[in-house]
Amino acid sequence: MDKSSLIYPMFVKEGKGIEEEIPSMEGQFRYSVDRLPYELERLQKAGVSSVMFFGIPDHKDEVGSGAYDENGIVQKALREAKRLFPDMYYITDVCMCEYTSHGHCGVLCGHDVENDATLELLAKTALTHVQAGADMVAPSDMMDGRVMAIRKCLDKNGFKEVPIMSYAVKYASAFYGPFRDAAGSAPSFGDRRSYQMDFHNSREGIKEALLDVEEGADIVMVKPALSYLDMVTKIAQAVHVPVAAYSVSGEYAMVKAAAKMGWIDEARIICEMAAGTYRAGAQIYLTYFAKELAQYMEEGRIG
Ligand code: PBG
């Protein structure tokens, strides 16, 4: 376990002077671009050098155009962050759900998400992120074929060296509840079960990971982490690229809530969850507890 393997997910929002706490994720904030540097500085001091940006736009529309606007919120945040902290490593979540008026991860045809029509928009989103300074892109939409679409688009535009971390094994999970609050991205009808995976199924996860590697993924992710550690182990055995695990918003919220009640020892639980995830085979850990973990590693409580 090492600080360099931690990735801290962050929410960036349109506006000025905003640093607002997310009610369902105590201790996590939405930042406007001008407030973002203060948190980046705190992260850098703590030894966390990789962040992943999620955008919260002011306007949403049917086709999620804010996602691939070169002056979109993530693109603006990247340019500013890169200018002030060029040594940090910037990853972006590539998805449409924060930008579509209906909250689904792709464009719709009737009430169905149109897989193939969405691919082009995801590729465009990834390209604008990289042009704005992203070091790596992380598609989380779960459309089939999106890793290849993004790879081709980045290659064609001269970004052959920019890696893709695919949310390859992403389950349709209730653990994303607090995130959808934080990002305002809950679907306005239906659910995500036509594109995210059924959590009863483990073989499909292996298939998804292998497909993504074949399409060009440089890292594959399992998400959520805690209830899916068997999948982390299975994927680590099945692929020859690094495996990342994402301890998601619901996991964070449960720990925070129980700790607030005085029912658990927060620091020990954070360490145990992290150690379990690495023990299962993850080499990269995305967590809202990144700063705390970096501190615990520094103190030798975990390592
Ligand atoms: C976007 C996305 C989600 C998360 C990461 N990227 C939400 C979802 O799929 O509904 C969840 C992260 C978390 O819960 O911490 N599709």
Image (tube, rainbow, N blue to C red):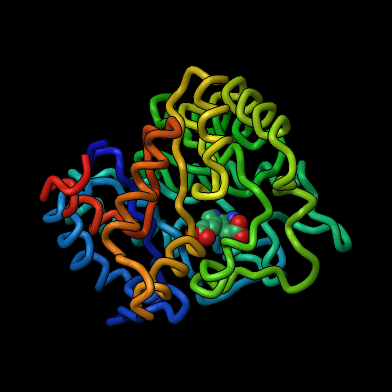
> Residue 47 at what x, y percent from top left?
16, 49
Q: Left of 79 or right of it: where is 186?
A: right
Of 142 and 153, the residue lying toward us: 142
Furthest residue to the top?
240
Furthest residue to the right?
110
Residue drawn at the location 70% of the way across and 68% of the way down:
187
Residue 86 vertical placement versus 168 (above, below): below
Dividing the image into four equal quarters, which quarter contains ligand 1?
bottom right
> Residue 247 at what x, y percent from top left?
45, 52
Q: Is residue 68 visible?
A: no
> Residue 180 at what x, y percent from top left?
57, 69
Examine the image and state in which quarter residue 167 appears.
top right
Residue drawn at the location 61% of the way across and 72% of the way down:
60
Residue drawn at the location 37% of the way across and 32% of the way down:
283
Of 143 and 237, the residue lying toward us: 237
Q: Left of 198 or right of it: where is 287?
A: left
**Count of picture labels:** 0
Examine the image and state in which quarter residue 209 appears.
top right
Furthest residue to the front?
263
Residue 148 vertical placement versus 33 (above, below): above
Residue 241 vertical placement versus 62 (above, below): above
Q: Is residue 63 visible?
A: yes
Residue 263 vertical placement versus 279 (above, below): below
Q: Considering the image in quadrants, where does the N terminus appear?
A: top left
Residue drawn at the location 63% of the way across and 33% of the way down:
149
Of 6 and 79, the residue lying toward us: 6
Q: Considering the image in quadrants, where does the C terminus appear?
A: top left
> Residue 147 at what x, y percent from top left?
60, 33
Q: Left of 190 or right of it: where is 166?
A: left
